[in-house]
Image: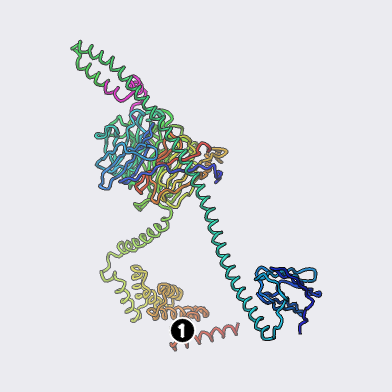
Amino acid sequence: MSAVLGPERPQVVSHVQQALSYTVFDCKWVPRSARLMCLGSAARGTGVIQVYELHGARLEVLREIEKPKPIKCGTFGATSLQQRYLATGDFDGNLNIWNLEAPEIPVYSVKGHKEIINSIDGVGGLGIGEGAPEIVTGSRDGTVKVWDPRQNDTPVANMEPVQGESKRDCWTVAFGNAYNQEERVVCAGYDNGDIKLFDLKTMSLRWETNIKNGVCSVEFDRKDINMNKLVATSLEGKFHVFDMRTQHPTKGFASVSEKAQKSTIWQVRHLPQNRDIFMTSGGSGSLHLWKYEYPAQRSKKDSEGSEMGMAGSLSLLQNVTLSTQPISSLDWSPDKKGLCVCGAFDQTVRVLIVTKLNKI
Amino acid sequence: MPVWLREHSWRQSLSAVYLSLPLRGARATAANIFCSEQYLKVSIPPFLFEAVLYAPIDDTNSTAKIGNGNISFTLYKKEPAMWDSLTLANADKEKLQHLRENAVLKAQEKAKEETEAKKITKQENKKYALEATMKVEEAERKRIEDLKEKERQKVTKELELWKNQQKDGDKYKSIQAKEELYQEKEPLKERKNEKIKKPQIPNEGSSKTRLRSTRGHGSCSIFSQDLKEEQLPAPRAAATIKVNFTPRVFPTALRESRVAEEEEWLHKQAEARRIINSDLSELEDLKEEEKNPDWLKDKGNKMFAMGDYLGAVNAYNLAVRLNNKLPLLYLNRAACHLKLRNLHKAIEDSSKALELLTPPVPDNENARLKAHVRRGTAFCQLELYTEGLQDYEAALKIDPKNKIIEKDAEKIRQLIQGTMQSS
């Protein structure tokens, strides 16, 4: 692991800290603005969505919305830049899309799953990529469903366990490979360590593997390009970076893994402005900033002549401990390089600025 | 007797006395000079010079210079007055002695005071040093804090700048939107008027305008929206992908650190299930009491007492199948095997019994004794006398007072010696 020189290392500066009166499960930047959205569960068992605006050294509440069920996850990924609708999954398995200006009635609503929706992702919106806007949800009932906001009630793709098979919790989902209108790929991570890659164009399972620990978070480095890298984080402080450009018929994708923290790594998020830098957040309240370096040769031929990928190497750029409780959610601002928000289970949301990312 | 040095010379001024003492070749150091307020002594064995001074001097400030074969003293008088002579005349022995003692005492006191003063200054120096280091560290910390602060402020300023840019951008966009809205409203109004003029298609017209106006309300321009919608592909054809999971028995998540524990648990469960299953499948035709290991053990004991060794072995076998953790079953089966001359099996069973009797406590002494004896007997009958002796000795250790075991052990020892002699 190579080290970056001392004074040139990126620093993580804590800009604002805001104490909340509810447990925050997810926090996201509202695209094209200095506003951020936090959602979670209030003590009385209702769901809360709050929109804050960054004013100097403090966060001002712009809007507070209460919903009957606690909300677990949300994304802006599938809406247009003008609309900026928020898609949320709640503890009851309902997928709702809200217009934050008029949040009483959802723009789209469906009871998608029988149990809590653990993770949600959107693609096709925000002017990124091409193709239909779609939302994918992964739930504790073991199914992963892809929804199109134009089609009510039924998902456009449903990845469910075979009849009679006992279900495993799906903990995380991510879209990828959406570089043209037809191609889409969904990656899902489960609590028994399974990672499955579903190809939506051919509606088939493209690849699966098991990383021996429950998978907490998966993310492609970019959703809208030919799939390049996939980072999967898990329990026991490990994470794996897969090189997704070369798929070997039997060995699958090459990977490099790193054991960073003693505790669960809850989230991984790639920097929108540089796809080789990503941040992982841990159960011990720490954040680690990593850089991936590509190997000299990304692929080589093995003994049978089939292409095999080569994994690169990782270097730790910086780490910082912000809280004593796990940092469960993390989001980079797509508009300002280095600005990020993280929400932790100590009921605080923090806005951080990572400096010197230009020099990496 | 010391050699007195008497060839000293002195001169004086009003405030000081200058004394010069030739050393006659002796080497002098500071330790040889002893001076107090009214007494001066130079002792370089065997030479000695002492002087009881005419008047008291200030001995702390007075100096002595050693060099060139003599010592030059510069003694500063306490009271500036001219002395008649260097030393006090008419000084009798007692007075001299007294003076000397006083001088010594005074010197000692002075020495003590000096050490005290030194200690105090040392402490103060230490304190000073500590404070100085603390200040330095403080300064360092402050410097780092300042750097961080500066960084923070810089970053905050940048953020503010960016935010304002955003705001301006938004304002500009909203102004644009408003303008475009206004622009569309004009043609809409015209169209509306037209439609009203044509009453035959009022519904279509009004619905169209309604649709158009709602579409245009929140976004920039209707036309671009239409175009965009056309570009989006239709929703995907619904399909299902069937998924198989890596099998896992536990409902909890998989953790590497727990895998070993989980394996052990599963193993134990499997074994327990196996025992129960084996009972259920094969022994359905047995009576209720015959499924009880203790009842079977008693039956076995009765059969042994009657001499039916095979029957006893059968009973014990069944009992072991039901519960393989009772050491007594193995013990008794070992006895049966001994009688049946199945010596290897006897050894096996007594070993298993001993294993189960592992915590060697007084409670299972009896059982262990029997096990050792039986195993010992089996070994001896197999002519493995050394192993047999080992077991007998173990038995003796448990119960040293048992005569029979002792006798047998002796016998075996003799047998061993006998074989060794002959071989």
Residue at image x 27%, y 21%?
B213
Residue A167 screen position, x and y as percent: 33, 46
Left of A211 or right of it: where is B179?
A: left
Where B163 sits versus B62, above or below?
Answer: above
Q: Which residues are magenta?
A: B213-236
Residue A176 makes an appearance in the image = no
Q: Please tell me whether residue B232 belongs to the stretch shown in magenta.
A: yes
Q: Residue at x 67, y 86 (%)?
A: B94
Q: Amino acid at mark 1?
A: Leu
Q: Position of residue A285 (x, y in %)?
A: 41, 49
**Residue at 79% of width from left, 74% of height from top?**
B23
Q: Is residue B211 visible?
A: yes
Quarter of the image for residue B207 reads top left
**Which residue is disc 1 drawn over?**
B396
Q: Main secondary structure of the magenta part?
A: helix
Above or below for A205 versus B309? above
**Residue A59, quarter of the rendered image:** top left
- Identify which residue, B12 or A92, lies in the foreground: B12
